[in-house]
Image (cartoon, coloured by chain):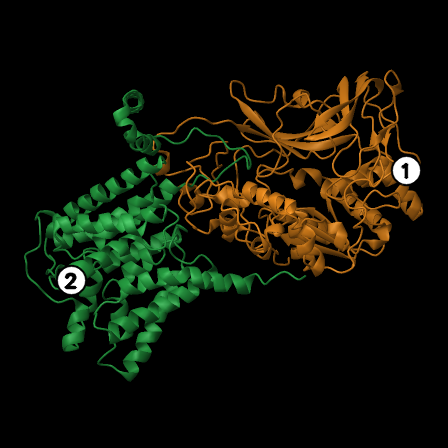
């Protein structure tokens, strides 16, 4: 086994309470779904159905000819009730509500066969594209149908990762249970056929030893695949960190890995593309981890896309507490305030936190048997097996910065957050800030997490960036001179027309 | 707990009703915040570290407890009186400034209030300690804008003020420490037996004090600097707890060893040997507790190394060649002056101008 690779900075969240169990429960097919026509990156599809029309599960209901996008499917059989615009994650988005009959059957993708190796590359690309899998992750899977900002032949490297560096993650042990480990390898082969010029890297947490060993055994014959055990240190799962640790290449901060020819996919995206090509399954359901102390039994569920959150969460949350639900990441994720909103393709974890407004007596003197901290001042640091509490209390009052340098020590991109914030607070917004690489910030939120003075550093850096941009100092000036042959820069984010 | 809650709430109500007592608000709030944790919740990120400034500062005090206990043993209960004076008068300055700024009281003072008495001679008159702490907190910290904005370590400013204003009280009267039985725990003050500090002895007679005495406090010196074992334990505790950074003390001590080694080789009557330099005077206390002050020290990693090396060099230079026998105090002040400049130089190298 090779030594695990990592980056400088970062912080490992160890053993927070409410880690999801390795069990998978299928949520029953909902009777009503709402499907947003823009899920994740890319352009919003135009709606292909009208109210009152009957749809089948797996039928494409949204599709855009312009811009970078992937088709969106109906996830249940039923009748379209309504098509309307709503505010979805701070952006305006078309939503299709469908009333269903509860039948779990779905329409298979045309052309999918068991023996996928006999298919031509174009056919595979078409199946993957039509399944909607291409919309997953930061920049998706490139195909000839403009599902990503680059073309498949431009992809120089493909990184498949299941590092799990967040406080709560979908368990890779569950995803790769039993036969799925073979499916993953087949899936990687399929993607390799789509992207013939790409070197393939499989990055897994160095703590899932069993899986690593098994995959190494299964793939020892493939010289095109490199397996990287990575230290599960936050934010290793970010594209910004995977590119430098694995490819030893600079990341164009603020742009995407695709711009430098790297396609980065999650384990689930690979498994789903395998299912699409071999089993003909469109992307209509996802495995989601329900974790955190607010859930009775944290575990994984498989839910249809469009299922209202309420249906997923209800009955699984502990009674008699006010919970806060967070999407995907505790440090950066959206708070899910409206439980009527649906699940979409981008969901991988829903974290339930307990709102804790309780004022603890002499809290700064407690030994902290269960408190997590970057510093070594709590007992919990010496007993890694104890589950740590995880709540929304601020654990202290906001104070002026004392330059303790915790933020610089954890910063994964090597900037000095407290210095930047001091400049921004004094309104010194000029080239000094740009020289201090304010635009390198990847907004991982780790500086705000570790700050003992409880200063919202990440937020203020972001505000500083925005103010600088208003003044005409652009991110491009900091990034573009350092990279030649940037790919897909015209297609970057969103459609040209429309 | 409930009783305390009710007391605090009634006090707050009382101060809100009575306009004359409005200035007490920061004090009541500070007491409230000390006894009870916050009820605020996070926005983004959704979770925050359990560490806060109160714990940060109180752990520095915990690290100073062995030193303070050792000081009481060596110099008698009078040490406690000096510490109390320092806390009361320094706290008053802090409260007045907090009230006039209409801001909360910051915890940084807790450390200054304990560190300041530890660097005074044991014979210091109480009024002098009060003057020193008032001057130090006011001109070392508050007029710069309070915690986090000061350029100089307030304790050092106070101490330098005293040694400039009252040189005889600060440099000539030293006590012989208790070293038997329960020591100073039952006596108010050590007997007025003047004895030169180890550094003075070296300067005048070229004698090197026994290392056991230096380590355990059997020699004369300032209140907190002679029990060096406690200083080392406290300093290592802080480094281990990630509260102070290891780079500064390590580079400072290494630099003292190297510089004094060189000096001792060429001019043995001026420069004391390396190990004696480390274990004499206020060097250990200064390196572990004052140099590592995050606010006044450098924050870049390279800057920490540079400042530590410079500090050691200055200490050896002042001890060896100047009219003073001890150079830690002035070196600390100079390092505080230099560190923003050094940080700037380091930043210039670390972050070259972006390409155009």
In this figure, what is the number of numbered marks?
Answer: 2
What colour denotes chain B?
A: green
On screen, residue B227 versus residue B141, left or right, reads left
On screen, residue B313 versus residue A449, left or right, reads left
- The answer, for residue B134, to whether it is visible in the render is yes
Identified at 77% across, 32% down, the residue is A38
Q: Quadrant of residue A286?
A: top right
The correct choice, above or below, for A122 with respect to B192 in the image is above
Q: Name the spot of residue A2 as percent of width and height, x first.
A: 64, 59
On screen, residue A440 versus residue A189, left or right, reads left
The reply to whether dot 1 and dot 2 touch (C-beta < 8 Å) is no
Mark 1, residues whose alpha carbon is within 10 Å: few (<14), some, or many (≥20)?
many
Identified at 29% across, 60% down, the residue is B286
Q: Name the spot of residue A186 as percent of width and height, x first.
A: 81, 46
- The answer, for residue B272, to whether it is visible in the render is no
The chain coloured orange in the image: A
Q: Name the spot of residue A471 as percent of width and height, x first.
A: 63, 47
The residue pinned by badge 2 equals B167
- Assign a secondary structure to mark 1: loop
Q: Name the spot of residue B315 as percent of width and height, x first.
A: 30, 69
Please identify the residue farthest to the front as the structure is shown: A471
The residue pinned by badge 1 equals A112
- Assign a secondary structure to mark 2: helix
Identified at 65% across, 37% down, the residue is A170
The correct choice, above or below, for B97 with respect to B60 in the image is above
Task: Say which quadrant the C terminus of chain A sits in.
Answer: top right
């Amino acid at each position: 086994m090779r030594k695990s690779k990592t980056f400088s900075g970062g912080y490992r969240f160890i053993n927070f309470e409410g880690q999801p169990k390795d069990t998978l429960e299928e949520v029953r097919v909902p009777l009503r779904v709402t499907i947003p026509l823009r899920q994740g990156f890319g352009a919003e599809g135009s709606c292909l159905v009208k109210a009152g029309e009957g749809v089948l599960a797996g039928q494409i209901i949204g599709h855009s000819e312009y811009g970078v996008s992937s088709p969106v499917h109906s996830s249940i059989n039923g009748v379209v009730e309504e098509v309307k615009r709503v505010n979805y994650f701070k952006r305006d988005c078309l939503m299709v509500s469908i009333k269903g009959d509860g039948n779990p059957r779905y329409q298979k993708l045309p052309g999918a066969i068991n023996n996928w190796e006999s298919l031509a590359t174009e056919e595979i690309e078409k199946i993957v594209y039509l399944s909607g899998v291409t919309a997953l992750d930061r920049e998706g899977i490139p195909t000839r149908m403009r599902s990503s900002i680059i073309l498949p032949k431009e992809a120089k490297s493909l990184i498949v990762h299941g590092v799990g560096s967040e406080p709560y993650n979908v368990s890779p042990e569950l995803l790769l249970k039993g036969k799925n480990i073979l499916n993953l390898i087949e899936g990687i082969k399929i993607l390799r056929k789509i992207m013939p010029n790409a070197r393939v890297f499989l990055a897994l947490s160095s703590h899932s030893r069993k899986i690593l060993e098994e995959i190494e055994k299964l793939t020892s014959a493939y010289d095109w695949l490199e397996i990287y055990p990575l230290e599960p240190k936050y934010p290793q799962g970010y594209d910004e960190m995977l590119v430098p640790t694995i490819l030893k290449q600079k990341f164009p901060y603020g742009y995407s890995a695709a711009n430098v020819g790297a396609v980065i996919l999650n384990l689930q995206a690979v498994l789903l593309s395998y299912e699409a090509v071999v089993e003909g399954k469109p992307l209509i359901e996802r495995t989601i981890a329900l974790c955190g102390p607010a859930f009775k039994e944290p575990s994984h569920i498989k839910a249809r896309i469009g299922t209202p959150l309420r249906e997923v969460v209800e009955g699984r949350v502990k009674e008699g507490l006010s919970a806060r639900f967070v999407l995907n990441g505790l440090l950066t994720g959206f708070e899910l305030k409206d439980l009527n909103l649906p699940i979409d393709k981008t969901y991988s974890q829903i974290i339930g936190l307990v709102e804790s407004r309780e004022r603890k007596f002499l809290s700064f003197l407690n030994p902290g048997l269960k408190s997590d901290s970057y510093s070594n001042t709590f007992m919990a640091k010496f007993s890694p097996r104890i589950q740590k509490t995880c709540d929304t209390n601020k654990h202290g009052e906001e104070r002026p910065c004392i330059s303790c340098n915790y933020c610089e020590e954890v910063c994964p991109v090597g900037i000095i957050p407290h210095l930047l914030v001091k400049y921004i607070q004094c309104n010194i917004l000029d080239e000094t800030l740009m020289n201090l690489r304010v635009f390198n910030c990847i907004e991982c939120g780790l500086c705000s997490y570790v700050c003992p003075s409880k200063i919202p550093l990440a937020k203020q850096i972001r505000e500083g960036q925005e103010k600088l941009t208003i003044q005409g100092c652009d991110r491009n000036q900091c990034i573009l001179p350092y990279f030649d042959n940037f790919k897909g820069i015209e297609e970057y984010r969103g459609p040209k027309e429309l | 707990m409930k009783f305390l809650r009710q007391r605090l709430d009634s006090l707050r109500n009382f101060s809100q009703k009575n306009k004359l007592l409005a200035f007490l608000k920061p004090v009541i709030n500070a007491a409230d915040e000390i006894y009870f944790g916050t009820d605020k919740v996070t926005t983004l990120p959704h979770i925050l570290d359990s560490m806060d400034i109160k714990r940060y500062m109180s752990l520095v005090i915990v690290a100073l407890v062995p030193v303070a206990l050792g000081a009481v043993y060596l110099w008698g209960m009078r040490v406690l009186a000096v510490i109390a004076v320092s806390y009361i008068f320094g706290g008053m300055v802090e409260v007045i400034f907090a009230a006039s700024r209409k801001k909360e009281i910051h915890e940084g003072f807790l450390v200054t209030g304990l560190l300041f008495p530890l660097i005074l001679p044991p014979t210091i008159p109480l009024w002098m300690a009060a003057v020193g702490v008032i001057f130090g907190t006011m001109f070392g910290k508050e007029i710069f804008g309070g915690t986090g904005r000061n350029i100089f370590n307030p304790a050092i400013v106070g101490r330098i003020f005293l040694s400039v204003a009252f040189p005889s009280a600060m440099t000539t009267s030293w006590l012989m420490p208790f070293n038997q039985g329960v020591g100073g725990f039952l006596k108010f003050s050590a007997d007025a037996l003047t004895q030169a500090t180890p550094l003075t002895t070296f300067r005048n007679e070229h004698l090197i004090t026994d290392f056991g005495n230096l380590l355990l406090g059997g020699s004369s010196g300032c209140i907190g600097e002679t029990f060096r074992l406690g200083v080392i334990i406290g300093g290592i505790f802080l480094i281990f707890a990630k509260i102070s950074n290891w780079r500064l003390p390590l580079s400072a001590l290494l630099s003292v060893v190297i510089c004094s080694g060189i000096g001792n080789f060429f001019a043995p009557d001026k420069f004391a040997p390396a190990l004696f330099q480390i274990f004499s005077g206020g060097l250990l206390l200064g390196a572990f507790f004052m140099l590592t002050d995050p606010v006044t020290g450098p924050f870049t990693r390279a800057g920490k190394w540079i400042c530590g090396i410079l500090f050691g060099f200055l200490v050896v230079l002042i001890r060896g060649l100047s009219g003073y026998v001890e150079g830690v105090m002035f070196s600390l002040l100079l390092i505080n002056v230099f560190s923003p400049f050094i940080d700037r130089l380091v930043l210039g190298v670390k972050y070259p101008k972006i390409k155009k």
